[in-house]
Image: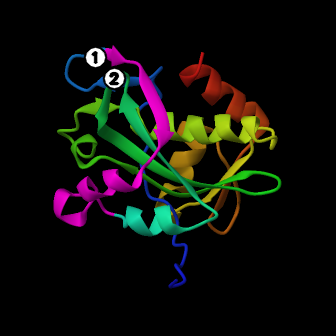
Amino acid sequence: MKEQTETGLDFEVDKLTNSIENAKSGDSFPTEISLLTQPELKGLTKKKGWQFNWANELMEPSREVYKLTISNNPTIIQGLISLEVKPDHVYMHLLESAPFNIGKAKAYLGVPGNLVAFACKLSFQRGTEGYVSFLSKTRLIDHYKKTLGAIHLGGHTMVITTEIALKLTDKYFK
């Protein structure tokens, strides 16, 4: 398998919501997060507007790829996250909102926040006390500090600590 270089995540947290929120009406919708399956990959291509090669992520044995969907509507993927459980934290490799949830005309707000909160929840479940780390693009370091409460450790490394992870998980997973 070809070695991938980590260049830093570049998702933007538009709003921390309690689930996801319709951008036009403000209506809130409960969500579910589950493992992405091989058959679902056919709809996740660059031709359909997805930026990353999710098939590669799914093939990495150390990673788990999760999809965010609206409850009772499991066929429309709102966003994806690739996570690796390490001995002392969960590492976020990739996070991407669905193409229709990006830009000024996005359908739903809160997708990235929901996925990051899930990474924190998984960290608690796997015994790593809510700790989550990721690499950030330089231009987004201050954004992640402000919106997520992430701590900048230097270089491109960002960390979400137990205290912040509790706030995020409490917001999204009651």
Q: Is residue 154 visible?
A: yes
- Give the residue at x 54% y 83%: 3
User: Which residues fall within the magenta stretch?
Assistant: 28-51
Marks 2 and 1 in Cβ contact (< 8 Å): yes
- Give the residue at x 39% y 56%: 38
Residue named by callout 1: 26
State the residue in front, 100 or 62: 62
Q: Is residue 14 visible?
A: no
Q: Quadrant of residue 165?
A: top right
Disc 2 crowd rating (10 Å Cα; few below 14, some 14-19, many 20+) is: many
Looking at the image, residue 71 lies above or below residue 164 = above
**Image-based side of 31 in relation to 92, left or right:** left
Q: Amino acid at mark 2?
A: Glu
Number of marks present in the image shown = 2
Q: Is residue 127 magenta?
A: no
* Earlier residue among tags 2 and 1: 2
- Give the residue at x 36% y 64%: 52
> Residue 157, position in %: x, y?
66, 62
